[in-house]
């Protein structure tokens, strides 16, 4: 791999770490925030949902804007501004102020995911796009883990404010790495920002991929949101120890990278259903009453989820380009669906937990995993536009 390609890889890896550490920084804190502010488990999950709502809605704007003004500018702005707002979250004067700041942070975070896969498709050879997309998604997984682990550990010793400040500082370090490493675009061609175009909503394969993103993410976030409550109540763990369960997330980094390689070799249509089966198997394992099996189940589910998401997110710009759809626009719709699934389906986990404890959470997540599997099978019947869009 050329030096420039390596710089792209590691810059977007660092950007993914910063983005997803910030996005999920409150997830390990949900039980603590519920107690601190006197809110229910379902209400506490809004500290995550507000960020994903802001992110998802803004993606519909940032994707098309990047077609006109370029990718790298948005990436730099997104990583830096979201870190600064993260520091502001640490000094929020109350619950509603925290929710507003999390909404603003989600808006700021939208610049990276809106353009990352389109940037990779434009700047890297097709032969390594799947592999590098997998590495980028792996950075997302590592960032999600870092945000949860860091806040869980720091909050137990110093409180939730210092925990959120620590994630903000991590974001600033990553922003510096991106500033140094990320190369300027060479192959970007400006085109009019197509806000009103519906081409990205007419291809049946893209529509299935959007649905896969929404359902897979909904299942994964539902389990992750409720897991902290289960670990602190059923298993008697502290917030820091409960946050340590997210050490399984490097499995997602390995899985997304491996699935990208497999997709390059065997085709995306073959790899996607396998990822759904792995996700379902891991979800069922979490029903066990023995903590090591629960953690192993979460690891298996994480591997399956990042396989599905890694393949789907890399597939969207390839399919869009083959169908003469603006790739950033298609990526924006995919990520809008992805974060809508997180916001809507994930927030239902608190209600499911309150109504029926862990079996109800698993039942809820199983519905979304099942829909993901159905859509992945449906994709096998949709004709490929070109050989690279398998």
Image: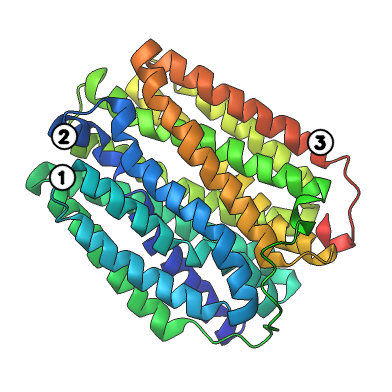
Residue 271 visible here = no
x and y percentages locating residue 251 in the rendered image? 47, 46
If you read the primary sequence from the N terminus, does the residue marked by circle 2 or circle 3 appear first? 2
Viewer-side label of 2, 3: 2
Residue 103 visible here = yes
* Along the viewing direction, whichever of 221 and 140 lies nearer the viewer: 221
Residue on which disc 2 sits: 37
Q: Are marks 2 and 1 in contact (CB under 8 Å)?
A: yes
Distance of label 3 from label 1 (alpha carbons): 46 Å
Distance of label 2 from label 1 (alpha carbons): 8 Å
Q: In this view, does 296 lie above or below 366?
A: below
On-image quarter of the C terminus: bottom right
On-image quarter of the N terminus: bottom right
Please tell me whether mark 3 sits on a helix, a strand or a loop: helix
x and y percentages locating residue 35 in the rendered image? 16, 30
Residue on which disc 1 sits: 94
């Amino acid at each position: 791999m050329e030096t420039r390609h390596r710089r792209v890889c590691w810059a977007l890896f660092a950007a993914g770490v910063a983005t997803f550490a910030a996005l999920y920084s409150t997830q390990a804190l949900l039980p603590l925030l519920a107690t601190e502010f006197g809110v229910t488990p379902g209400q506490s999950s809004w500290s995550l949902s507000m960020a994903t709502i802001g992110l998802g809605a803004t993606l519909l704007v940032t994707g098309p804007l990047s077609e006109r003004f370029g990718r790298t500018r948005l990436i730099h702005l997104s990583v830096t501004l979201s870190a600064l707002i993260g520091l502001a979250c640490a000094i929020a004067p109350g619950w509603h102020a925290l929710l507003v700041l999390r909404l603003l942070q989600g808006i700021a975070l939208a610049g990276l995911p809106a353009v990352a896969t389109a940037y990779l498709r434009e700047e890297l050879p097709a032969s390594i796009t799947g592999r590098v997309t997998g590495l980028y998604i792996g950075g997302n997984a590592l960032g999600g883990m870092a945000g949860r682990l860091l806040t869980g550990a720091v909050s137990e010793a110093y409180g939730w404010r210092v925990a959120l400040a620590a994630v903000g500082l991590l974001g600033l370090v990553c922003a510096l790495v991106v500033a140094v490493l990320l190369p300027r675009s060479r192959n970007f061609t400006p085109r009019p920002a197509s806000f009103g175009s519906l081409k990205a909503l007419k291809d049946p394969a893209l529509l299935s991929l959007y649905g896969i993103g929404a359902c897979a993410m909904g299942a994964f976030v539902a389990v992750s949101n409720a897991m902290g409550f289960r670990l602190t109540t059923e298993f008697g763990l502290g917030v820091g120890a409960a946050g340590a369960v997210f050490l399984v997330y490097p499995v997602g980094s390995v899985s997304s990278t491996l699935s990208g390689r497999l997709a390059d070799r065997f085709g995306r249509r073959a790899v996607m259903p396998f990822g759904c089966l792995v996700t379902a198997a891991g979800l069922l394992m979490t029903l066990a009453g023995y903590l090591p099996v629960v953690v192993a189940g979460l690891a298996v589910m994480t591997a399956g989820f990042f396989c599905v998401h890694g393949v789907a997110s890399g597939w969207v710009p390839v399919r869009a380009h083959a169908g003469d759809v603006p790739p950033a626009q298609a990526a924006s719709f995919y990520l809008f669906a992805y974060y809508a699934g997180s916001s809507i389906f994930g927030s239902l986990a608190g209600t499911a937990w309150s109504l029926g404890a862990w079996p109800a959470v698993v039942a809820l997540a199983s519905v979304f995993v099942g829909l993901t599997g159905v859509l992945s099978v449906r994709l096998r019947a949709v004709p490929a536009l070109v050989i690279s869009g398998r």
